[in-house]
Amino acid sequence: MNAPGHADLARRPLPEGFVEALQAQFQERCSLSHAVREHHGRDESPYPPMLPDVVVFARSTEEVAWVARHCHEHHVPLIPYGAGSSLEGHFLAIQGGVSLDLSGMDEIVAINAEDFTATVQAGVTRMALNEHIRDTGLFFPIDPGADASLGGMAATRASGTNAVRYGTMRENVLTLKVVTADGRIIDTANRAKKSSAGYDLTRLFIGSEGTLGIITEVTVRLYPQPEAISAAICNFPDLRSAVQSVIEVIQMGIPIARVEFMDTAAVRATNAYSKLTLKESPLLLFEFHGSPSGVQEQAQVVQEITRENGGMDFEWADKAEDRSRLWTARHNAYFAGLQLRPGCRSSTTDVCVPISALAECVAQTAADMDQAPFPYTIVGHVGDGNFHVLMLLDADSQEEWDESERLNHRLVERAIAMQGTCTGEHGVGLHKMEFMLAEHGQDALDVMSSIKQALDPHNIMNPGKMLPPRPLD
Amino acid sequence: MNAPGHADLARRPLPEGFVEALQAQFQERCSLSHAVREHHGRDESPYPPMLPDVVVFARSTEEVAWVARHCHEHHVPLIPYGAGSSLEGHFLAIQGGVSLDLSGMDEIVAINAEDFTATVQAGVTRMALNEHIRDTGLFFPIDPGADASLGGMAATRASGTNAVRYGTMRENVLTLKVVTADGRIIDTANRAKKSSAGYDLTRLFIGSEGTLGIITEVTVRLYPQPEAISAAICNFPDLRSAVQSVIEVIQMGIPIARVEFMDTAAVRATNAYSKLTLKESPLLLFEFHGSPSGVQEQAQVVQEITRENGGMDFEWADKAEDRSRLWTARHNAYFAGLQLRPGCRSSTTDVCVPISALAECVAQTAADMDQAPFPYTIVGHVGDGNFHVLMLLDADSQEEWDESERLNHRLVERAIAMQGTCTGEHGVGLHKMEFMLAEHGQDALDVMSSIKQALDPHNIMNPGKMLPPRPLD
């Protein structure tokens, strides 16, 4: 389970005096301990731990800038670290260097309720933000399963179950404070809702996975808590009929807030893990936001569509606690899946295709996966054309790993042929890097590399990720 | 009325044989005629014409790539030209070179109605697209006043009256085909609704104003034509009460489709130009999209809010022809304004501020403008915090020009102090270039310049626009 294409990128020792200078500056917030380094060199990806040489805990943008200048000067790799919830090997220290932990930058800088914006330091998690603003009548909708940090979510262009209605981090960030690779501090934009003033630096850093600079502050859009919320579950005889229902809902233009697919195995795992009694067949989990009459109107149309597609037992969950239980269960589907094979190592796929291709893509994938020598589950943000296969591998079996990679390759090829992407929301990290050429083509990849070279000339920012690896400067 | 900061950027003659090679390649689609060059060197900005040396009419992405390679090789400025509707001097050939007219690239490449996407060549205009898809039940919402080309709209990150509900070009482009400065052809993304695969090249080229490459194909999102549409006009005793109503509507989270402000002078001009009998006081023009009951619900809440703010004569326009007449009048407000002072030259402002600052910003601006020695009108996409002052200047008066620039300066400073932007939707071009430093700061501007340098090393792409001018390579 080696990271692909990195055989020739050896680590090299830190320059003399480099760590001492960090220690002098950060005191006890600079750690060389194995336990701390291991914690910062291990994620939810299938790769083994790859430890940074040193971990620094930053408290301010100025401290981040200091570290960046120090690393820039000495050509030492610098890897921003948020909540550590990456699935794709994003922050594994493949070439060593400094892991810069931003989780202590957890200040809510400003809530501008009148403008529906919040400005937070990068280490604030999405749940902490929502907890903080609960009394304003507003909420922040983007919800990857994990309680990720806003900085990390911006860096990976994250989304989640609400994206079908509210968009992704791409649509929901107004401006970022960023430390460049050489330690300058910039604001990428301002709080105006729209602007045509210059290159879109905000969107350039969103999804850049720490390879261009370090996001230290994020200004996001907030939304009014819906007047009415309603949720429903609907079971289906098979996967195709469930997915087909979603396609029709989307094509009707229903402003649905969430629509999640779970296959039978995922439902079974969730029942066991979250102590639920959902019927164990392919199902869709819906949520509707709006005015009371609007919600009712949406739900009625959706119920009709599911019925026409063979949906059964359209069940309502109107009470807040029932809804909350359901969505917590959905968010725990990843951990629930892992329990299907205790002690396993997981590998996750993340393709996203145009909705017209979704049923075919999911069906072909399930047929493929049925031949695999390991268990799997499928869940998906199907309203966006995005779904995940969670493959549960014997941690010691190279054979299973190879087969999971082969199946993922086939899936990504299928998605790209359907004009889709290898990653809808997890990001590239290490694990999707090999697909970048097939997805973008050499010329577009060269344009990305030119930008990387221009903004990070010494290649110190999270090196060896996203773009084809090149040696350190 | 010289363009700022360009005194030292002299034109230089085209290299020997350069034009002959273009002529050999493009035959009658390569023009040196004064009339054609003048047509391509004159826009709606306050600047005098600045003519390109030669105009080429492209028919395909491959032809565009050929021209780019030719210009790159010979270090000759290359300026993409769409519908010619810029207000900010975007395509004036300040350093001469080639104007590359894309208006003949007007093919609808693909309509994917099931996915709500359309792929068109860059020269297709927004009205041509909407005409083409009328029978699909879908529409493309972005509507700058002019019938701009989709390529130009992407290049300037355009928006318009529908942006409050549907977003701008930033949110509504899925992928672009782009010819780079050295003539490579790339697709910036694919048709997946969301993706985390690499740098967001799509958003980088959106708003880049032809300074990084040439957009030759645009894939946009379409929307279902709303089941019900309703429009309304409401008059107000003063500007503040109108703007305050909008702020409250937005803060209530009403999913209003359009909300436009016109001051008394703008209403008067529109009455005269479009032969209407609107009451001549500050007014708001609303449009609601949704289900019949949803539209009614929205309109009721809005009517209450306007009434509480002193709004009078809330008047409905439910019939399609009445609505169409109203919105045509609104879209013609610019030309209507020009008629207030026949033979005048206009200068337009375009600030956008957070909605909480909007009432103050508009009121201070109107007070300022009341001191001006020339007539003006104010109209605005106020739901987004964006408004325009149209200043009507004596074409021969340097004094009026200087005063309009001073007032625009004050306005932009005000907007930036309120965390806003100098341009919400028109783009930077020549006319807003001097504000880039104040808005972004030197370090962010340097980051933009690094990107420009990386993707256009010879500085041939629309040189002297947007970023501080530098000499040709």
Image: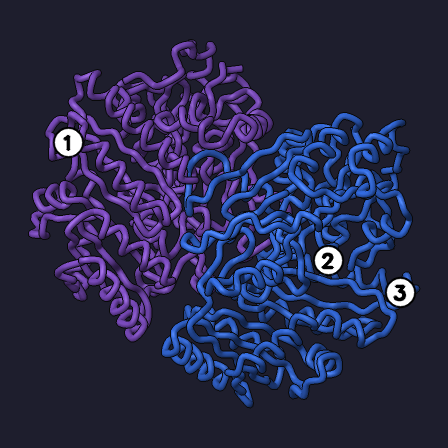
Chain colours: A purple, B blue
- On the question of residue A347 being in view, the answer is yes
Q: Residue A196 versus residue B102: which sits nearer the camera?
A: B102
Q: What amino acid is found at the position of numbered circle 3 in the picture? A: Ala
Tell me whether marks 1 and 3 sit on the same chain.
no
Label 2, label 3: how far apart the Cα atoms are = 20 Å
Residue matched to label 2: B85
Q: Please identify the quarter of the rendering in which residue A272 is found.
A: top left
Image height check: is A286 above or below A37?
A: below
Q: Residue A410 versus residue A319: which sits nearer the camera?
A: A410
The answer to whether the residue labelled 2 contacts the one labelled 1, judged by CB atoms less than 8 Å apart, is: no
Residue matched to label 1: A375
- On the question of residue B439 being in view, the answer is no
Where is residue A415 drawn, in percent x and y? 37, 37
- Write the residue at 32% across / 37% down: A350
The quarter in which the C terminus of chain B is drawn is top right
Residue matched to label 3: B395
